[in-house]
């Protein structure tokens, strides 16, 4: 009996050891993947910051040389200052996004969950990108009903909707359409932001929410930091929601946010 008991105990110990080793192996693989993502993200961010600051330095060189030799007119100075403002603005936005992502990942940005009116939040979000849409003659249609209430942080949900809708404008051709709608699914509200733009490749979709990715230029040459959708995913997770995307190159994209209903 004692021998049988000892053998059984030994078998259990071996199973526990094997289970522990498997868990450690998985954790090690996950850590390696996270480190690789961080390495790639840092590489992308470093490249974008270097390019942006380098452009600003070149513009300053042009201004300095022109003033020194007396061949820069006020009109040229104004144009160069305008270009420099755009470049500096992109750098600032990238740094702002990185700081926001860091705060969320460190747990320093806690959401204030309230019952909010979804249609109002969408209207607030698209108001800030209406001018860009107008320039490209893109119609943004908000089909969400007036009585739809969700449980969310007002600032976070506005930021997420604005970011996704802004990307839709960026990657949609002149004269395109963006449709924002919602549907009640059990205890959730599913918010859809759909465009008929250039779409997303399968390769991009596999990592679109997982890490910082290289941002591709928009249909009118618009640029971005590649950080936005990572922040969106983190914010939605903080609000007990999920986000997913369906897309086909050349036909457009559909982002769906699932968030608790109020």
Image (cartoon, rainbow, N blue to C red):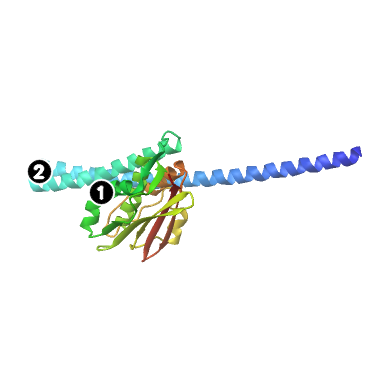
Q: Are marks 2 and 1 in contact (CB under 8 Å)?
A: no
Q: Quadrant of the N terminus?
A: top right
Q: Quadrant of the C terminus?
A: top left
Is tag 2's residue or tag 1's residue first in the polypeptide sequence? Answer: 2
In the image shown, does 245 or 213 lie closer to the viewer? 245
Lateral position of residue 144 relative to residue 68, left or right: right
Lateral position of residue 180 relative to residue 8, left or right: left
* Distance CA(mark 2)–CA(mark 1): 45 Å
Q: SS for tag 2?
A: helix
Residue 124, horizontal then vertical, whole percent: 28, 46
131 up-or-down from 114: above or below:
below
Q: Which mark is residue 153?
A: none
In the image shown, does 73 or 3 lie closer to the viewer? 3
Which residue lies at the image location 19% right of the left edge and 42% below the top edge? 60
Q: Quadrant of residue 62?
A: top left
Q: Quadrant of residue 235?
A: top left
Which residue lies at the image location 34% right of the left edge and 63% below the top edge? 198
Q: In the current view of this chain or complex, which residue is farthest to the front?
A: 147
Residue 2, horizontal then vertical, whole percent: 90, 37
Which residue lies at the image location 42% right of the left edge and 33% below the top edge? 108
Residue 46 visible in rendering: no
The residue pinned by badge 2 equals 69
Q: In the current view of this chain or complex, which residue is farthest to the right?
A: 1
The residue pinned by badge 1 equals 127
Q: Residues within 10 Å of mark 2 (few under 14, many from 20)?
A: few
Q: Residues within 10 Å of mark 1 (few under 14, many from 20)?
A: few
204 up-or-down from 14: above or below:
below
Residue 222, horizontal then vertical, whole percent: 28, 54
Q: SS for tag 1?
A: helix
């Amino acid at each position: 009996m004692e021998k049988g008991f000892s053998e059984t105990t030994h078998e259990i110990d071996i199973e526990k050891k094997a289970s522990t080793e498997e868990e450690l192996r998985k954790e090690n693989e996950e850590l390696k993947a996270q480190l690789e993502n961080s390495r790639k993200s840092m590489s992308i961010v470093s490249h974008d910051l270097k390019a942006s600051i380098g452009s600003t330095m070149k513009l300053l060189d042009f201004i300095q040389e022109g003033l020194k030799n007396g061949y820069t007119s006020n009109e040229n100075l104004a144009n160069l200052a305008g270009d420099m403002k755009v470049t500096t603005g992109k750098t600032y936005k990238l740094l702002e996004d990185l700081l926001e992502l860091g705060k969320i990942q460190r747990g320093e940005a806690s959401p204030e969950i309230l019952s909010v009116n979804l249609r109002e939040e969408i209207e607030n979000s698209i108001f800030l990108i209406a001018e860009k849409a107008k320039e490209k003659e893109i119609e943004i249609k908000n089909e969400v009903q007036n009585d739809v209430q969700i449980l969310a942080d007002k600032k976070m949900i506005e930021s997420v909707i604005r970011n996704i809708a802004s990307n839709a404008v960026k990657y949609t051709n002149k004269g395109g359409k963006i449709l924002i709608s919602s549907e009640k699914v059990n205890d959730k509200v599913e918010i859809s932001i759909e465009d008929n733009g250039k779409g997303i490749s399968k390769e991009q979709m596999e990592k679109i929410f997982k890490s910082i990715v290289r941002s591709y230029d928009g249909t009118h040459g618009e640029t971005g930091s590649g950080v936005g959708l990572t922040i969106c995913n983190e914010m939605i997770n903080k609000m007990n929601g999920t986000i997913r995307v369906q897309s086909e190159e050349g036909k457009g994209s559909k982002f769906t946010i699932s968030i608790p209903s109020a």
